[in-house]
Every structure is written in structure tokens, then in C-alpha cells.
Image: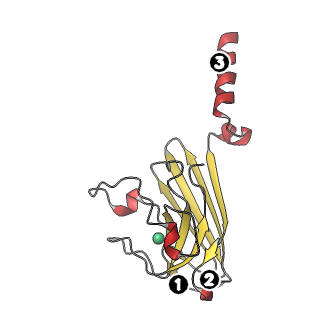
Amino acid sequence: MYRKRAGLAAAAVLVAVPAAAMAAGVAVDHGHGPTVVHDTTYEQIRTQVHAWSSDGTTRVRLMVTGLPAGRTFGAHVHTGTCGADPLASGGHYQHSTDPSVPLAEREAWLDVTSDANGRGVATTTVPWAFAPGSAGSVVIHAQPTNTTTGAAGARLACTSVEFGG
Ligand SMILES: [Cu+2]
């Protein structure tokens, strides 16, 4: 009995996860932005990104305010962090490059539709966790995502998020 409790305590110290996250068994990542706006038409937008991972499943939520009303914008998790160059955020994060798996299942897409007040929320759940250091931002694009190619037009704004800790 005593030995078992001691072992658990040692494991908790080694992992060094914050107590609140340990209790829920969930890792949480945040981003508030946008970090960089690439199109000055969108300078008034505000973004929040939250990601929760547990047991190999990850849920990502993008909240945006200040958008033009009633439009859908493509949005994805990208590999790099945001920079002045719109391409600094890199390509789409791909958990797998297996072409037999649909793109939408191996990338994290967060296409967001604005309401009459210019607010939008998008949530996606994927059956994997981000590899630490391999996903660094959420990019909002000018067009809805083409589900075959993943393309979504110009990069409007970028929010840096350290996915996977
Ligand atoms: Cu994208």
C-alpha cells in the first residue's frame, strides 16, 4: 500500500504537469490574438484559440470577433509560428501524410462562419494529439476551405499557439 502511493508521487514529480491539468487528465494550449494581421481590412478582428488533449483525442476551438457579417472563412492549424511574412506560418499541420486518409481527418480545420454581429466560433475534434513543436499557429483565410485540396485563399490573420506544449 505504502509502496504504491510512493510510486505514484514520484511519477507525478517526473511528469511535472500543473496540478489542475493533472486532475482532469487534460493538456491545454492557448492563443490570443491575432498575433499578426496580413490584410489591413481585418485589423479589428480578435481571436482566441483553445486546445484540449486527452487520451489521444484533441479538441481545438477558434473564437473570432470583428469579422464582416455572414461569411465563412477557412482556418487551419499551421506548422509555423506567425511572422510578418504571411508564409512564415508554414503549411498545414498534417498528423499523417497517408493519402488514403482524407485531408480533413489528418489536418485540423476550423472554418468559421460569422454571425450578424461578426462573431464566429469553430470547434474541431481530431483522433490524435499534436506532436510538441510541430504546430505553431492558427491561420484565418479569405475563402472557405476546399475539402479536396485544403486551399482557402489569402492568409488574412495569424494567431500563434504552442500546440502540444
Ligand atoms: Cu491555412
Circle nearer the viewer, 2 or 1: 2
Query: Can I make out residue 1 in this image?
Result: no
First along the sequence among labels 1 and 3: 3
16 on left or right of 70: right
Q: For disc 2, does the CB lie below 8 Å from ligand 1?
A: no
User: In this figure, which residue is indicated by the disc labeled 3?
Assistant: 7
Asked if 15 appears above or below 2 in the picture, the reply is below
Amino acid type assigned to the residue bearing label 2 in the image: Leu
Q: Quadrant of residue 82?
A: bottom right
| Numbered tag placed on residue 67 in the rendering | 2
Amino acid type assigned to the residue bearing label 1 in the image: Arg
> Where does the N terminus fall, quadrant-wise?
top right
| Numbered tag placed on residue 71 in the rendering | 1
Identity of the residue drawn at 31% across and 56% down: 101
Spatial separation of the CA atoms under disc 3 and disc 2: 51 Å
**Label 3's element?**
helix
**Tag 2 and tag 1, C-beta contact below 8 Å:** yes
Spatial separation of the CA atoms under disc 1 and disc 3: 54 Å
- Residue 103 in picture, x, y percent from top left: 36, 62
Counting other residues with Cα less than 10 Å from the Cα at mark 3, is it few (<14), some (14-19), or many (20 or more)? few
Amino acid type assigned to the residue bearing label 3 in the image: Gly
First along the sequence among labels 3 and 2: 3
Counting other residues with Cα less than 10 Å from the Cα at mark 1, is it few (<14), some (14-19), or many (20 or more)? some
